[in-house]
Image (cartoon, helix red, strand yellow):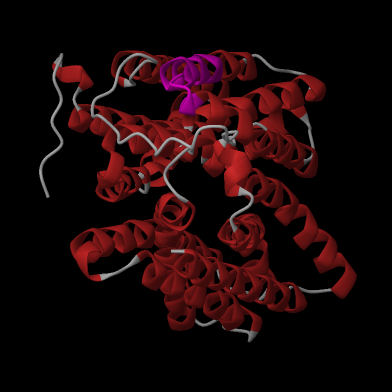
Amino acid sequence: MAAVRASGPWRKRPATILWMLSLGQLISWGLVYYTFPLFVVPMTEDLGWSRSSMFGALSAGLLVAGLCSIPVGAWIDRGHGRKLMTGGSLGAAALLMVWSRIDTLPLFYVVWIGLGICQAVILYEPAFAVITRVYGPRYKQAILLMTFLGGLASTFGIPFAQLLIERIGWRPTLEVMAAVNLVVALMHWLFVPGPGEKAIAIAAPTPPPEGTVRKSPLAAAVRVPAFWGLVVAFAGYGLAFSAMSFHLIPLLDDRGVPIGVVMAIIALIGPMQVVGRVLLMAGQRHITTIQLGALVYFAFPVAMAMLAMGVSDVYGLILFAVIYGLANGLVTILRGMSVPEFIGPEGYGVVSGALTMPTNIMRAVGPIAASLAWGAFGGYTPVLWGLAGIMLVAALGFAAAAWLSKRRT
């Protein structure tokens, strides 16, 4: 395959854009997304707020991020990625600074709703849309590299923020994080292509016959049956993932697992995500998108069924963390690859945004739904079987999308 070439300044070359955007993903995910739980305890001690009320602000932000997905994707398709991603990082910096001076709960909700909007324009989906525009048919390799670096976000962000909180306190830590996001904003402004800039000529879609009305990419996508299969696949994953993310620690604590073992299991999941992406980078030529999806959607129900069956010994939990971590690392790549392959590359941003909206809404619903189910059933075992069932339905959605896309082709 011929290398992607570009004329113009070095900062507009595809490889440079990819590396800078990937570094931006590492920092944005690490500091804007993953660090929230670290501030819960010190803020509870200083301000007296309940944990549930603080996590409510997080859910509100995730919900808003989902609702913003479609307009954000449409704007990126029109070439406004630079303004959006730069503005998102600037907004995140400003809101982190406001957070560092916060003393009322309603203002905290306002801050997190604003951060939800910022996440909608600085995290994977908009970055995938930009990279797909830049790399054209070579988008798979580019997405692999981006998600590999992004997979290190929690490994970077959580220890970095925790060290600062212990040394200087939670308010100054937020100020430092705000300053780092200003650097990310500068990176986005310098390296993301503007409306009139293209690092590679993307093949233009075949024009419609004379006299026909051209549909928008989203209107065309929703008429593709595979689109709805992907909605089921990724929305189901979003609900199950967020429920597991916020309930895994109390679940293991309820079963009497020592806190040291719990922390070790949690710490193992992140590196396993990176391992999964490294393995995929090494074997990308030997695995198709459909095979990758089958692997991912087989692993998730197995991991949740293991917990539902009562696994609580160290070796069983390590096996769970390996399976769950590997699958969770690969599903992000799967999301980036399946849209252009199953539906088509045209209008990637708005189509991907339409798929992200229900996913993020389910992410916001997941922790609350799991809490209500835990209260109703009096334990986590029925919740886990329910999550395993949801992931089986999600697997059927992906299988349907794959079959329908092949039939359409």
Q: Position of residue 75 (x, y in %)?
A: 53, 24
Going by the picture, which residue comes out furthest to the right? 376
Q: Quadrant of residue 2?
A: top left
Going by the picture, which residue comes out furthest to the left? 2
- The residue under the point 59% across, 40% down is 218
Quarter the C terminus occupies: bottom left
Toward the viewer: 114 or 162?
114
Going by the picture, which residue comes out furthest to the bottom? 309
- Residue 84 highlighted magenta (yes or no): yes
Going by the picture, which residue comes out furthest to the front? 211
Q: Quadrant of residue 159?
A: top left
| Residue 84 in view in this figure | yes
Q: Position of residue 8 (x, y in %)?
A: 15, 15
Toward the viewer: 85 or 46?
85
The majority secondary structure of the magenta stretch comes to helix
- The residue under the point 30% across, 14% down is 190
| Residue 35 in view in this figure | no
Q: Is residue 2 above or below residue 329?
A: above
Magenta-highlighted residues: 76-92
Q: Is residue 273 above or below residue 402?
A: above
- Residue 311 highlighted magenta (yes or no): no
Q: Position of residue 405 (x, y in %)?
A: 49, 64
Q: Is residue 103 above or below residue 327?
A: above
- In-image side of 15 versus 348 (left or right): left
- In-image side of 161 versus 377 (left or right): left
Q: Position of residue 100 (x, y in %)?
A: 60, 18
Toward the viewer: 330 or 311?
330
